Amino acid sequence: MKDMDSDGPGLIELDGVEKVFDVRRRAGLLRREKRQVRAVDGITFRVARGEMVGYIGPNGAGKSTTIKMLTGILTPSAGRLRVAGIDPSRERTKLARRIGVVFGQRTTLWWDLPLIDSYRLVHRMYRIPDRRYRENLERCVELLELGELLEVPVRQLSLGQRMRGDIAAALLHDPEVLYLDEPTIGLDVISKARVREFLRDLNAERRTTVVLTTHDLTDIEQLCERVMVIDHGRLMYDGALAGLHEVGASERTLVVDLERELPPVELPGARVVKVEGPRQWLAFPAAQSAAPLVARIAAEYPLMDLSVREPDIESVIAKMLSRRKVPEPAERTAL
């Protein structure tokens, strides 16, 4: 594959990337045996500048291992990987100036220092020009509502406050790519909404490329148009969020309130899954329009009210992965 610089269509490029770990385990009183654990198994994808991509999958799927290779923490066992034209494992320091990383369960802030002192250290570490640093700091403080927290030691911040502080720290040097690993874990509803709004604005205004890994699939639904699903180190799906429903054979639900209790509604293309008095729940394929069903019900039944419920994306992914043959544990166990 041809090398591409940061202005090309592939700001992030992976081509047949693998990561294999040698793991030793006890096989007797004095004997240990070695086996290989394949955490990432031949993954290929590109992320263009300005995309917001969800990178999701179950625990142990290989998400964190992929992110660590993208940031240069781990070296691929095979394949080709480039971020902004840079090989992360060979030029980690150079790459660090062009990426930002936020790990939801680990902070990059200095625990006993006030928040503002952590930002001053970032200023010097990245050698950010003074004017650019002030502008970026003011913007992050305003949009993430950090003004009253700047003089508070990091150890005294709540989880939500610290997470907002970590996001600001990752953005002070204007990274081209932002990796977010569980950025809303443990946050309350208000903090989650604030973080999501900030990320949408960041992407829209500065075209910052965002790769988001999370178990909170509401993050994915509200932020990402493209989603990649990984399982046992292999890429199972890469496409539009809406396409997951087709792949997962998901269903939408039509909730119908009738004037009185009636036998289950009978309509082609739909099936009744629940009846409670005059209320009935009808399931139909997510890719199918609800309009014909609504028209038929309105014409043939004493309709009072109705609503359409979208499928739960978490259930869609679980169904999709459950149909896949699980590989041999000794060969495919992911980290």
Image (cartoon, rainbow, N blue to C red):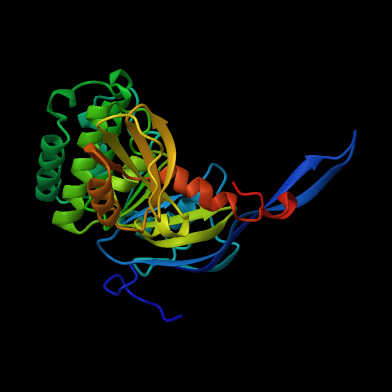
- Left or right: where does residue 59 sit relative to residue 27? left
Q: Where is residue 11 in the image (x, y as percent from the top left)?
A: 33, 67
Q: Where is residue 85 in the image (x, y as percent from the top left)?
A: 36, 70
Q: Where is residue 329 in the image (x, y as percent from the top left)?
A: 72, 49
Question: Toward the viewer: 273 or 76?
Answer: 273
- Left or right: where does residue 41 sit relative to residue 245? right
Question: Toward the viewer: 202 or 151?
Answer: 202
Residue positioned 33% across, 35% down in the render: 184
- Left or right: where does residue 294 sit relative to residue 131? right
Q: Position of residue 269 (x, y in %)?
A: 40, 55
Residue positioned 24% across, 24% down in the render: 114
Q: Which residue lies furthest to the bottom in this view?
A: 2
Q: Quadrant of residue 138?
A: top left
Residue 310 seen in this snapshot:
yes
Please determine whether, in this image, residue 137 is positioned above or below residue 179: above
Q: How many labels does the image show?
A: 0
Residue positioned 76% across, 44% down in the render: 24
Residue 57 seen in this snapshot:
no
Residue positioned 37% across, 38% down in the render: 281
Q: Quadrant of residue 186?
A: top left
- Left or right: where does residue 86 sit relative to residue 114? right
Please determine whether, in this image, residue 330 is positioned above or below residue 304: below
